[in-house]
């Protein structure tokens, strides 16, 4: 059970996946992919393109699947149920245009360090044009400080960069997971999707 909205914001931390999904599905983190909580919701939406499948709390990342058809999605859920994983433990989103990726990864901000500004940041990323988990397995790059800041500002459009700073104001010690594209994507038609904000 997720915490109340006010409590999450007051704490400035996303402590578990229940909190995260509660805020994400409401669009609280900004630009997002289309998401569904069941195959029934997918069918009702008449989405006929590819689907990504992810686990909620307690489900390992290895159970995620990418670029499945609707039929493959149903078959995979049946397979998971035979393993003892109920389909209610899975969540779904539209497959993104990986061929248009520029960078993807996660960024963190460290507070007032000696001799450094409050926005000293660390960037972990990949330029591989595949789903993030797979891309980071093949290539993991690192930047920090001004180099990381310039890299992020160079790939995010202005509304996305403003969005990132707004998230850091609310959740200053969180890890923020993102993907940048060379075309507008998501419900807000910006070039960056914010996938996750977490302290877990």
Image (cartoon, rainbow, N blue to C red):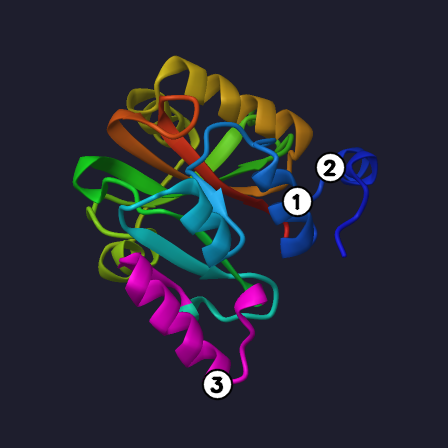
Mark 1 or mark 3: which comes first in sequence? 1
Residue that appears at 43% across and 22% down? 188
- Which quarter of the rendered picture does the C terminus lie within? bottom right
Mark 2 or mark 1: which comes first in sequence? 2
Residue farthest to the top? 158
Mark yes or no: residue 123 visible: no
| Numbered range of the magenta stretch | 64-88
Residue 124 lies, in percent from the top left, at 38, 46
Residue 158 lies, in percent from the top left, at 40, 14
The residue that mark 2 highlights is 12
Q: Give the distance between the C-alpha atoms of the residues marked 2 and 1, in whole angstroms.
A: 15 Å
Q: For residue 22, which numbered disc appears in the image?
A: 1
**Corner quadrant of residue 168:** top right
Q: For residue 83, which numbered disc appears in the image?
A: 3
Please name whichever residue, 71 or 191, is drawn nearer the observer in this view of the structure.
Answer: 71
Q: Give the distance between the C-alpha atoms of the residues marked 2 and 3, in whole angstroms.
A: 36 Å
Q: Main secondary structure of the magenta part?
A: helix
- Which quarter of the rendered picture does the N terminus lie within? bottom right
């Amino acid at each position: 059970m997720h915490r109340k909205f006010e409590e999450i914001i007051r704490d400035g931390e996303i402590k578990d996946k229940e909190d995260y999904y509660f805020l994400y599905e409401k669009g609280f983190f900004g630009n997002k992919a289309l998401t569904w909580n069941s195959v029934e919701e997918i069918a009702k939406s008449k989405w006929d393109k590819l689907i990504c499948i992810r686990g909620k709390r307690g489900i390992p990342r290895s159970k995620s699947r990418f670029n499945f058809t609707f039929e493959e999605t149903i078959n995979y859920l049946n397979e998971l149920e035979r393993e003892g994983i109920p389909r209610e433990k899975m969540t779904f989103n539209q497959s993104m245009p990986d061929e248009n990726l520029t960078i993807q990864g996660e960024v963190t901000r460290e507070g007032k360090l000696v001799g450094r500004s409050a926005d000293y940041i660390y960037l972990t990323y990949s330029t591989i044009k595949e789903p993030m988990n797979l891309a980071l397995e093949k290539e993991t790059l690192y930047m920090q400080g001004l180099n990381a800041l310039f890299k992020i500002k160079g790939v995010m459009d202005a509304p996305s960069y403003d969005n990132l700073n707004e998230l850091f104001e609310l959740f200053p010690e969180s890890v923020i997971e993102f993907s940048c594209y060379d075309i507008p994507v998501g419900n807000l038609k910006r070039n960056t999707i914010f996938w996750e904000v977490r302290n877990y």
